[in-house]
Amino acid sequence: VANTDGVLEYDGASWRLIDVPNYMVRALAVGPDGRVYVGGVGTAGVLVPDSARAGQLAYREVLDGVALGDAAVWGAFPTDRGVVFQTFDRLVEASLDGPVRLEIAPAGQRFHKAFAAGGQVYVRLEGAGP
């Protein structure tokens, strides 16, 4: 469960908070690999097994070198190649074993809505189209 304090994990008996930088989580998605991808304010990553605490998950940033500033990640869309994170002004495709690819919205426009279908990610530019 995403919330303003991080990600909440329920084990059937109790809740545990998984810390995420900047705290506010806006997007969660489960990929075909079973991993949980997380988008927050200024951060995007994945939940991985915690090496310090057996059986628990920890947050790991996947956008090394891509500055999101204080932009909120509103969508996380796992694909066969990795995961696409969507903010209002950029799309970032991250592969866990490869480079990060960045697309920036055209000047004066924003990525308004995004969704995935058939293994592809589609984005609506605000103010464009019908």
Image: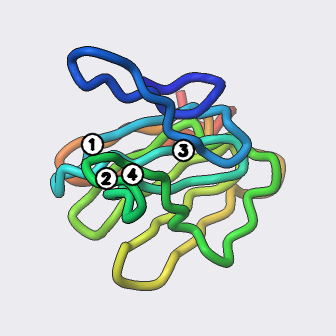
**Residue at (31, 23) in percent of width and height:** 10
Residue closer to the observer: 44 or 21: 21
Nearer the viewer's eye, disc 4 or disc 2? 4
Residue 62: x, y in percent?
51, 67
The residues tagged by marks 1 and 2 sit, at their Cα atoms, a distance apart of 7 Å
Are the residues at dot 4 and dot 3 in contact (C-beta closer than 8 Å)? no
Disc on the earlier residue, 4 or 3: 3
Disc on the earlier residue, 2 or 3: 3
SS for dot 2? strand
The residues tagged by marks 2 and 3 sit, at their Cα atoms, a distance apart of 12 Å
Amino acid type, residue under disc 3 in the picture: Gly
Amino acid type, residue under disc 4 in the picture: Leu
Disc number placed over residue 30 in the picture, else none:
1
The residues tagged by marks 4 and 3 sit, at their Cα atoms, a distance apart of 11 Å
User: How many C-alpha atoms fall within 10 Å of the one at disc 4: few (<14), some, or many (≥20)?
Assistant: some
Task: State left or right for residue 36 relative to residue 26.
Answer: left
Residue 33: x, y in percent?
17, 57
User: How many C-alpha atoms fall within 10 Å of the one at disc 1: few (<14), some, or many (≥20)?
Assistant: some
Nearer the viewer's eye, disc 4 or disc 1? 4
Label 2, on which residue? 78
SS for dot 1? strand
**Residue at (28, 70) in percent of width and height:** 81
Residue 123: x, y in percent?
48, 44
Image: 100 above or below 10? below
